[in-house]
Image (cartoon, grey):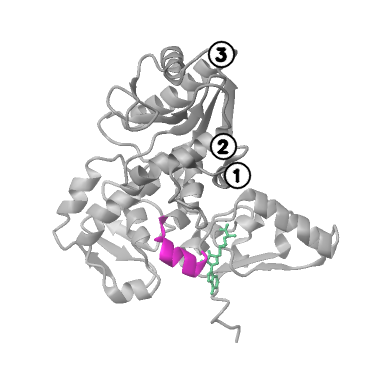
Amino acid sequence: MPFSEEDVKTQIEHLFFKDCVVEKNRLDFAVSDKKGHALYWAESKKGNYDKWLMLAQLFLTIKPRIDKAELPPIFIGCFDAQDITFVEFHHAQDVFQTNDFNWNERPSAVSPKTAAKIKRILDGKEITFRWLEDKDAVKEFVKRNLFHTFNDLLSYSGISGFIQITKNNFVQVFDRWSRDVLPSIAIPPEMLKHGIMPRDFYLADLLSEKNKTISDKLKILLNYDAYECQLEKGLFNKICFKDKGSAHKKFWNAYERPPKKEYRKYMLERQDLLVPSGIRERKGAYFTPQIWVEKSQEYLARVFGENWQDEYYIWDCCAGTGNMENGLTNIENVWASTLDDSDVRVMKENQRLLKNHVFQFDFLNDSFD
Ligand SMILES: C[S@@+](CC[C@H](N)C(=O)[O-])C[C@H]1O[C@@H](n2cnc3c(N)ncnc32)[C@H](O)[C@@H]1O
């Protein structure tokens, strides 16, 4: 192959990221705009290399940064002397949440097994170009998806100093919020026993305008200088700040709220990403990806025949936010219940389900009397 790894990086930088800041120390290749907003983090190699191995290596390298709540770029990816790959960062959340991933592997000695796991999660979500042959396509892609997306976000707030919260970074902003704001909220301990979680306060903050929650689908609402609990009105009506809201104010001064409308639905649907892993495992709070949804319907048809949707009633009794019901055609025959009230609220807004077929139910402990 004609290029050394340094040559490859230099070419990629000159061809596609001329007006950006490219750092090659902590990561192979980290692109940001001139104000320091991260746009693209990539693993690089010379020659022709397996992209899933490169991506696996990148994941192992960036994990400590993500754990420290560093704000991620819009895209991650990899390139060698032939191909360049881009993956929108929010897809990476599913890799970070995988519980059978060996995060102790050394990036430089990543195993094919780990690469295969990355492939299983991200295959089809990545975009790969032959960069030498398709320079114009890459330039267009970068312009549209990295620079335009970014400028769009800036013009949304009109103030470029604010950090925009998108589906790519809302988990990392939650991690920062948990570190900086959560300790200043006087949450009664018994409230946590009632299933209220820190994420409910974060969502109340995030989906608010001028410190008042604008979403009616949340358990906790922010009402200027205190929170209110919608679920148990009267029981814990007001939750105050221990420091008169000073940490809260300082934190949110850096971010634009509420996020763009197009991201809000995603954030409500992916609340599962905002659950600490211990609780997540206990509750089985895992979002079901579309490929498994399709598989489940394929198996049901195999067992119950091709008219199963008309001939049977379907009750998903641990429905979460209702992804298993994607693609079902006879909604009259579908019921969905789940443990968490916040998931019930999300499902009630789902056009693919009938509102009165959605309810809160603990299938291990509740019964129909
Ligand atoms: C694997 S997730 C289902 C995910 C769902 N298919 C989706 O994609 O949103 C399991 C769900 O069961 C819920 N769950 C856990 N224990 C439950 C219980 N005892 N009764 C009802 N739902 C429960 C969890 O809150 C979680 O949302």
The residue pinned by badge 2 equals: 52
Q: Is residue 13 visible?
A: yes
Mark 2 vs 3, N-terminal side = 2
Give 189 or 56, whichever is nearer the viewer: 56
Numbered badge on residue 116: 1
Q: Which residues are magenta?
A: 274-284
Category of crowding for the residue at label 1, using alpha-carbon neighbours closer than 10 angstroms: few (below 14), some (14–19), many (at least 20): some
Give 26 or 329, whichever is nearer the viewer: 26
Going by the image, does 215 lie left or right of 368? Answer: left
Q: Quadrant of the C terminus?
A: bottom right
Against 333, residue 46 (above or below) is above
Which residue appears at 30% of the width and 39% of the height?
Answer: 256
Say if mark 1 contacts mark 2, CB within 8 Å: yes
Category of crowding for the residue at label 2, using alpha-carbon neighbours closer than 10 angstroms: few (below 14), some (14–19), many (at least 20): many
The residue pinned by badge 3 equals: 132
Where residue 136 sits, quadrant-wise, is: top right
Q: Is residue 166 visible?
A: no
Going by the image, does 55 lie left or right of 116? Answer: left
Give 39 or 231, whichever is nearer the viewer: 39
Give 117 or 74, whichever is nearer the viewer: 117
Which residue appears at 34% of the width and 51% of the height?
Answer: 174
- Badge 3 marks a residue whose secondary structure is loop
Spatial CA span between label 1 and label 3: 27 Å
Numbered badge on residue 2: none
Against 158, residue 298 (above or below) is below
Amino acid marked by disc 2: Trp
